[in-house]
Image (cartoon, rainbow, N blue to C red):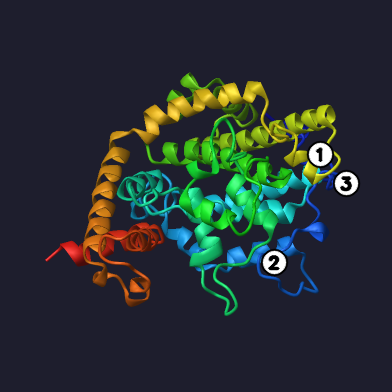
Amino acid sequence: MGQGQRAGAKKAKGEGAGSPPAQAPRAPYATDPGLSRGRLHPEPESRTRTPFERDRDRIVHASAFRRLKGKTQVFVAHEGDHYRTRLTHSLEVAQIARSVARRLGLDDDLAEALALAHDLGHPPFGHTGEDVLDLCMDGFGGFDHNAQTLRVLTKLERRYPAFDGLNLTWETLEGVVKHNGPLIRHGRALADLPVAIQEYDAHHDLELASWPGAEAQVAAHADDIAYNNHDIDDGLRAGLFTLAELRESVPMVARVAAAVECDYPGLAADLVISETVRRLIGQWADDLVDETERRVARLNPQSAEDVRAAGAPLVGFSDALREEEAGLRRFLMTRMYRHWKVNRSRSQAKRILRQLFDLFLAEPELLPPNWQLGGDGPRGQKTARRVCDYIAGMTDDFAIEEHKRLFTL
């Protein structure tokens, strides 16, 4: 393809063809920072930032946010510098959430804050770590990463003299807890929820039976876009599967990769992967905006409260894309998440966390001094939760090193 033809192809796809689209006018159903329900502990408002901008900034400066750089999703942190960590994933989710929110006329600062905060409660070693801690906490209230995020934001972060936590706005905390939908529905009661959510809701009602605001729904779907497509990238670069195998099993990937090769004949394999993933992210984001606009036209919400009371999500993907996603998830489950190399890392992680938890629970005096305060005996509820909080805050490498210190002669 000649230079003029290639430029024409880019223009036909909407790339480099004129100015980028302007931000959509503010939607009537967007969350208005001027009407925020405020913070649990009243504070003077900022002269230069909206409440949601302050929330975002507090999250970025939190120690739990910094530790995300050492927590992984699929691969253990020391396996390579190019694989995504919880930190890089959160930044990617935030970029997608902010972009989609702007196109829909929503408050992009709130969407960004929610995206940056959504993984703060994840323990080391990805979902394996969550599964292990939940088993360890059987009889002590269990472990749930979403509830742990709430604990981090409202209790475990200690940066201010007047209160524990970050004292975020009601809208941000609501969005963090409910970003995947109402927690009380389909026969599920408050008593069935994780203890951390029950305890917080008792003195700060997050309206757990309603849908969250549109910004939280955008952040949740931005998470789907990021991890689905970036797991493709990481899996290919790790050699867990090939692009040919992925194309054979996932039609959407096959179509996009074929278009890339048509536009750029002879393109190097690594650039084919990068361009394919980039275009896939764009297609998912476009579908999210288009489907949400269709739902808005049908439901006609006139306020953020209308979104909460809608009885169904306002933001979402089309049925066609959901079907494509299901095929991709099946492929990744078989070829990546259950790959024998990943299984080995998962097995090692299980032993490390289980042994650390059992040792600290039996001998809480081995915890650092600031983690020993407030316990109620070696087998008590408070001690177990404190041990769980300590382990959940670890990075992958810190957990490995702590295990070596305590179990290696």
Distance of mark 3 from mark 1, alpha carbons?
22 Å
Local packing at callout 1 (Cα closer than 10 Å; few below 14, some 14-19, many 20+) is few
Q: Which residue is mark 3?
A: 25
Whichever of callouts 3 and 1 sits on the residue coming sooner in the sequence is: 1
Q: Is residue 355 left or right of residue 1?
A: left
Q: Does residue 12 appear in the picture of this structure? A: no
Q: Which residue is mark 1?
A: 17
Name the quadrant containing residue 256.
Answer: top right
Query: Considering the image in quadrants, where does the C terminus appear?
Result: bottom left
Crowdedness near tag 3: few (<14), some (14–19) or many (≥20) residues, C-alpha within 10 Å: few
Residue underneath mark 2: 54
SS for dot 3:
loop
Find the distance from the CA under tag 2 to the CA under tag 1.
Answer: 36 Å
Amino acid at pointer 1: Ala
In the image: residue 390, left or right of residue 324? left
Q: Residue 127, which numbered label?
A: none
- Eye-nearest disc, 3 or 1: 3
Q: Is label 3 in contact with label 1 (beta carbons under 8 Å)?
A: no
Residue 169 on image: x %, y %: 68, 61
